[in-house]
Image (cartoon, helix red, strand yellow):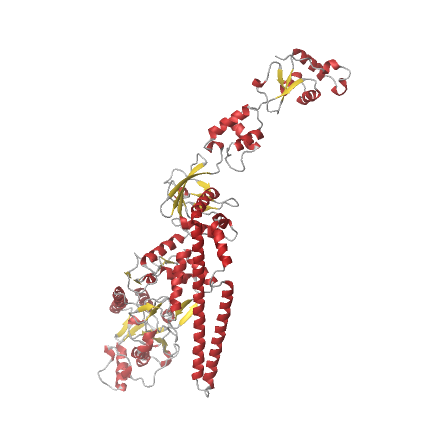
Amino acid sequence: MSGRKQHATIIPPALTLASAPALPVALTTSATPIASATSALLGLRATSKIRDVHLDRLAIVYVRQSSPRQVVENRESRERQYALADFARLLGWAPERIIVIDEDQGLSGKTAANRTGFQRLMAEVSFNHVGIVLVLELSRLSRSNTDWHQLVNVCGIFNTLLADQDGVYDSTDGNDRLLLGMKGAMSEFELITLHNRLARGTRNKAERGELFLHVPVGYFKVSMEEVIQDPDEQARSMIQLVFDKFTELRSAYAVFRYFTVNDLRLGFRRHRSPRIGDLEWRIPSMGRITMILRHPIYAGAYAYGIHRAGKKNPVTGNTEGGKMFLSPGEIAVLIHDRLPAYITWDQYLANQEQLRQNRALKESRGTPRRGEAMLSGLVVCGKCNHRMGTRYPGTKKPLYQCQEFYLTAAELPEPCGRIAAVTVDELVTREVLRALEPAALELSLRAIEDVERDRNRLHTQWRQRLERARQQAAKAERQYQLAEPENRLVARTLEARWEEALKHQRQEEEEYDRFVAQQPVTLSPAEREQIRNLSENIGRLWNAESTSVVDRKQIMRCVVERVIVTTDRTSEWNEVKIVWYGGMVTKHQVARSVGTFEQLKDYRKLAERVRELHAAGLRHYQIADALNREGFSPPRRRGGFTNSCINDLVNRLGLTNEMFRKDLLQKNEWWIPDLARELGIIATQIHYWVKQGWIHHRRTQSDRHWIVWADKDELQRLRKLAGKKTSWFSAKHPELVIPKKRRTT
């Protein structure tokens, strides 16, 4: 970028008319001295388009080159543009009235959005301050027809001239306006042509698999056409560790946490700065782990066009339609087996499918989370074959519900249904534990091998880190020893660098000692025995406090592919199909909670049994105990039948109580309320007579109610007795309190 100021006119002392750009044809002579050329210009000015009204205003020289590289390398073009200031002076403008605007050096002319110099030029023209705008080529002003015609229109309104090395143009003149429009269209088309030429050349080189701009971590660019795996052994092993852990953990976030917890780092090669190509070790971010898993280069494939840039929506201002990683079928150029690979192509495709399934979408299973529902993402509706969602309604227990009816109500006649999560979870958990029991010994041995392999891998990484730290310290020492003792300026710097390397080496050794103390290379006999004991009892391992909900879900997903649940809204029994990995399918039935007795599958049998027990005169709590013993379950399935539950069921069945049942009365027997109504007294008084033994009585079969006996003679006695004070009457009138002897048949 030139050091010239925008607000001042600087004319190089050595600049002459010969060094200025080519003058308009009407203003040049073939070979004349400077004085003659100046006289000719001044003489022809009267017949030119430049008038005094233009000379009274400013002359702006606009300087622009499209890229920083052009600014540095294309010096002739730069100097010719700055020489236009001398040309403006020869046209009659005073030096103090000439302004050079070069703020847009290194910026493309395809848009005016970020060009502050062009915006300043437009503002000056709009203020009616400018008489002429000079550029080396009109394409320097803009390569966009929109910006170009806006500038031409503004210049026409405020009578501002445009000039380049071919002539002076007045936008109010019809011929000049036509010529300016053609030049603007040609400038834009030239930009499109250049862009297409470069794009086609780039695409052609990419189709040969030879275009490498930057390579991802784990690879090293030897030349513009050759790429190899990183020559550093530790850098390669860390990339391989990412793929191994993803195969084991099945989640990019789990791999990221593994690297973070164990302080594992990836080796990054610098792409810029003087230390380009140097290896730096940094803890990877979540995005970096995902990039490694998504990039096809790690499967040995050359890929060009794996990203898709979005387009900005002019209404919302948001960029839409972009995609960070395209699927293999959408990549523009994909050449298999072109580069050294860390994984096979089949494993790459399996990783992409796993990443797709990890997304929390309707068509994918998602990753295990910390919710109570054990089968989130695995349950499929048996009616519509769509994945059932997991709901947590307030403080209630989770449930699985098919929401397809609410999303596409026109396609389904009614909701498919829902079921409590615990109902299905208990069944599948029981079946999974039963399936794992035969492999308990094999699982224990595999667990020991996995733990030891993982520890060996971590120890290998630590040993490589220590080796690297020692090598850096030794290198710093050699550099210090080679320095001349007299050159203390260099020696002090190298000494400080050596001390820093030694300090880093000591820190690495101390951290490794702590790591070895926490996780020895091999498992101790006690740890091996603990793993065997836990593996032999799968149920205890499953219910152990150290086993998290996420761990249980991960175990379940290793053996269960999906669970198909078919709910029946008319019954509490539902069909459950467990689809295991390997193709085996097992069918089961589970009972869920329903809202009414009529939805129970054995409702008829239950109703008949309740009628039998009720007819036998059993009390409600006795009926509830009998039903619970016989294995019946209420609709809500909460602790079995209760007294209130039997009351509700008896009312639904329309069963009357023992009270007032005529079939339970013998000749001359009364229910106490009926007798009280006959005698014109309250029922409590008859209950008193029963307790005193003044009336014949007996209990019903359920022992809940009294039945009293009274013929015509007894009714007369009881009427007399009802009119007396019974608290003192019995001693004076024994004939009224002693009941008549009842005949038994």
Q: Position of residue 682 (x, y in %)?
A: 67, 21
Is 526 located above or below residue 687 in the figure? below
Residue 329 location, quadrant: bottom left
Residue 301 location, quadrant: bottom left
Q: Residue furthest bottom?
A: 486
Residue 566 in sight from this viewpoint: no
Observer-nearest of 620 and 582: 582
Observer-nearest of 218 and 66: 218
Q: Position of residue 467 (x, y in %)?
A: 43, 72
Is 586 located above or below residue 514 in the figure? above
Residue 454 in sight from this viewpoint: yes
Judged left or right of residue 1, residue 572 is right
Q: Residue furthest left?
A: 30
Judged left or right of residue 104, residue 640 is right
Q: In the rendered image, which quarter contains the N terminus? A: bottom left
Q: Position of residue 489 (x, y in %)?
A: 46, 84
Is 579 located above or below residue 243 in the figure? above
For the point 53% across and 45% down, the residue is: 395
Q: Position of residue 12 (x, y in %)?
A: 34, 83
Q: Residue furthest top?
A: 713
Observer-nearest of 510 and 168: 510
